[in-house]
Image: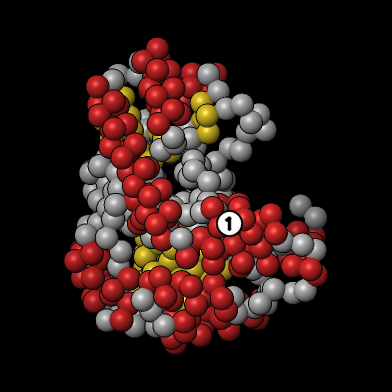
Amino acid sequence: MMKWEENVRKVVPYVPGEQPKDKNVIKLNTNENPYPPAPGVEELMNTMTYQDFRLYPDTDATELTKSLAKFYGVRESQIFVGVGSDDVLGMAFMTFFNNTEKPVLFPDITYSFYDVWADLYRIPYKQIPLDEDFHIRKEDYLIENGGIIFPNPNAPTGVLESVNDIEDIVKANPESVVIIDEAYIDFGGQSCLPLVEKYENLMVVQTFSKSRSMAGMRIGFAIANEKMIDYLKAAKFSYNSYTMNMPSLIMGVASVEDKAYFEQTCEKIITTREWFKKEMKALGFVFTDSYSNFLFAEHKSVPAKEIFDKLKEKKIYVRYWNKARINNRLRITIGTDEQMQQLIEALKEIV
């Protein structure tokens, strides 16, 4: 090791799902929405000129914040917008989880960026085991802590916790910030957003990447009380004022304003998911009762790694982790009906 390396902050980075260079594949490994964004987004893409890129973007994301406030029935001052929910969550870790003695709590099977951020910002943490059905035990979160975060529905399990159980956790931890990561809430779950008005220590984070088909535009947002949002903005503006690009800000508004298309697209994915569950059961798969845009499945006799490899040979990509407790499961994104039918036919040959 060179002498200067002693001062380097060393972390093991987050590993995203594979992005194959070959476009002639069925890509079901990163939970992207198979349908296009709202029609108004495409219209704006065709009308933008160089003038839209010449100036710095609005640091306060004013128009997008207004649209989100109207859509979700909250005040503009309760919204923080970032470059995807990863940016929002990473900023929240840096802003709120600063007690160096008490650990931040999150599940042992969850979004694998949480421990990366904790290591990056030197935040102590404790991973709380899910039960055998991959559910959170709320009593496990009634211990001393420096903060709490978990997705609902969870990723990669797709399991949804009840709002009542989540409220019990928030209520029992008034001295800690509790963050609920609702990246997949639009696919059948009940949001915790109504609790924000009731508890000043709660923050709810959502994204445009899944239900709004805009993963490439990188838009995420948090909703909380004004004081928490002010703290987030202070941290953001101390780091980088111009994080949101102009096209994302403009097209994000078009996406939010087309509520009918948003609801229609979510319903299509839910319908396909429920059909896919039945087909998978018939093939001998077992899985959690997913409320997300993916299934977390294992076969009764064929190992997950073998299925993963054989699907890849057929140019069908799903997600596999060689990790304890989940190394015999696959996370399969819900695509179009045609894509899922092709997957079923491939699985029939494999299993």
Residue at 77 percent across and 74 percent down: it is 55
- Does residue 148 appear in the picture of this structure? yes
Q: Choose top left, top right, bottom left or bottom right for residue 198.
A: bottom left
At which x and y percent is residue 315?
Answer: 55, 23
Q: Which residue is mark 1?
A: 41
Q: Choose top left, top right, bottom left or bottom right for residue 324.
A: top left
At which x and y percent is residue 286?
Answer: 26, 30
339 sits to left or right of 247? left
Which secondary structure lies at badge 1? helix
Residue at 32 percent across and 71 percent down: it is 193
The quadrant of the image that shows the C terminus is top left
What amino acid is at disc 1? Val
Whether residue 342 is situated above or below residue 18 in the rendered picture: above
Residue at 57 percent across and 79 percent down: it is 62
At which x and y percent is residue 265?
Answer: 41, 48
For the residue carrying disc 1, how many other residues have a C-alpha within 10 Å: few (<14), some (14-19), or many (20+)? many
Whether residue 282 is situated above or below residue 93 in the rendered picture: above
Q: Choose top left, top right, bottom left or bottom right for residue 253.
A: bottom right
Whether residue 192 is situated above or below residue 188 in the rendered picture: below
Give the mark count. Answer: 1
Which is nearer the eye, 226 or 9?
226
